[in-house]
């Protein structure tokens, strides 16, 4: 009824959606003008426009990337910093890995930070940025276990629960153990496992796998590496934070911390006022 009469929360939602659409449409229009003037850059938006996609589709894809890539990565890093504050040995291994790269943290070097990536994967296994997700069937189908899915049915999967299943991850499934992402628990050889995406469905799987997966990893690796090479993060409270599984899961109340300078030795710290 509120939608029919354009009032209340439905009116507010309509106005908010209109504002988002207009803002993104303006970004697309500006990019088109740059292309016409010869100021061509090979970013993702240019590639979408040159692929001949409709402006509406491009607009929706840009909105999806902006919305999906902001809250999810920040949530993932928040939980990683908390986990590392309880697992200082793993934190020191990341610091060592970062220190070996020197002052440079460029794209190629970030891709070589395998233990940091393993820590991110392990953190998202336990605390996925999207706790559950759903798909709607375009047509009738049958799942591998024989479950029948009718046309229009919604199928929901639960990454938070899947990440804590003993059948998938073993008896230590509730532990933060980045070593599980390496072959035979051998971190030194630097070979990261290719885990089945249907088992670790944080970035979805199949033809609808997250387009920004690698970009998200690079962003998170850069931020975490930049912070840990200079600072030590310590939680203000010893209480276990509460996981809030909304559209994008987050830590209730945020993560309140004390920040200390990290010495060149990586052991002594100086509290920042």
Image (cartoon, rainbow, N blue to C red):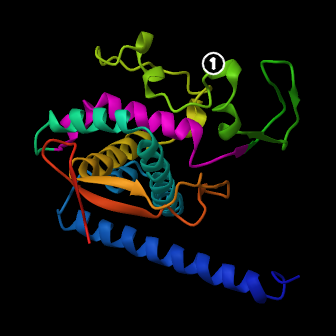
Closer-to-camera residue (19/258): 258
Identify the element where label 1 is drawn.
Answer: loop
Q: Quadrant of the N terminus?
A: bottom right
5 lies above or below 186: below
The residue shown at (20%, 58%) is 40
The residue shown at (47%, 34%) is 121
Q: Position of residue 265 (x, y in %)?
A: 14, 41
Q: Position of residue 29 (x, y in %)?
A: 37, 72
111 lies above or below 46: above
Q: Is residue 16 left or right of residue 51?
A: right
Q: From which residue to which does the magenta span run? A: 105-134
Q: Is residue 106 magenta?
A: yes
Closer-to-camera residue (260/37): 260
Q: Which residue is mark 1?
A: 170
The residue shown at (36%, 47%) is 220
Tell me which secondary structure the magenta stretch mostly adopts: helix
Q: Is residue 200 magenta?
A: no
Q: Does residue 209 appear in this view?
A: no
Q: Quadrant of residue 80?
A: top left
Q: Quadrant of the C terminus?
A: bottom left
Q: Position of residue 202 (x, y in %)?
A: 57, 38
How packed is label 1: few (under 14 Cα within 10 Å), some, or many (20 or more)?
few
């Amino acid at each position: 009824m509120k939608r029919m009469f354009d009032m209340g929360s439905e009116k507010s939602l309509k106005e908010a959606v209109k504002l988002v659409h207009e803002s993104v449409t303006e970004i697309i229009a500006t990019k088109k003008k740059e292309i016409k003037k010869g100021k061509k850059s090979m970013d993702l938006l240019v590639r979408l426009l040159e692929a001949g996609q409709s402006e509406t589709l491009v607009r929706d894809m840009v909105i999806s990337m902006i919305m999906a890539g902001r809250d999810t990565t920040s949530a993932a890093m928040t939980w990683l910093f908390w986990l590392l504050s309880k697992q200082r040995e793993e934190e020191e291994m990341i610091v060592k890995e970062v220190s070996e790269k020197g002052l440079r943290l460029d794209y190629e070097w970030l891709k070589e930070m395998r233990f940091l990536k393993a820590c991110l994967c392990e953190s998202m296994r336990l605390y996925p940025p999207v706790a559950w997700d759903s798909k709607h069937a375009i047509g009738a189908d049958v799942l591998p276990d024989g479950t029948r899915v009718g046309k229009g049915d919604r199928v929901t999967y639960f990454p938070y629960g899947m990440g804590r299943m003993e059948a998938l991850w073993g008896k230590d499934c509730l532990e933060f153990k980045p070593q599980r992402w390496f072959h035979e628990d051998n971190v030194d050889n630097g070979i990261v496992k290719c885990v089945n995406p249907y088992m670790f469905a944080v970035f979805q799987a199949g033809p609808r796998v997250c387009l920004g997966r690698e970009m998200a990893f690079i962003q998170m690796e850069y931020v975490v590496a930049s912070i840990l090479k200079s600072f030590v993060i310590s939680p203000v409270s010893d209480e276990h934070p509460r996981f809030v599984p909304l559209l994008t899961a987050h830590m209730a109340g945020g993560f309140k911390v004390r920040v200390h300078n990290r010495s060149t030795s990586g052991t002594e710290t100086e509290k920042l006022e």
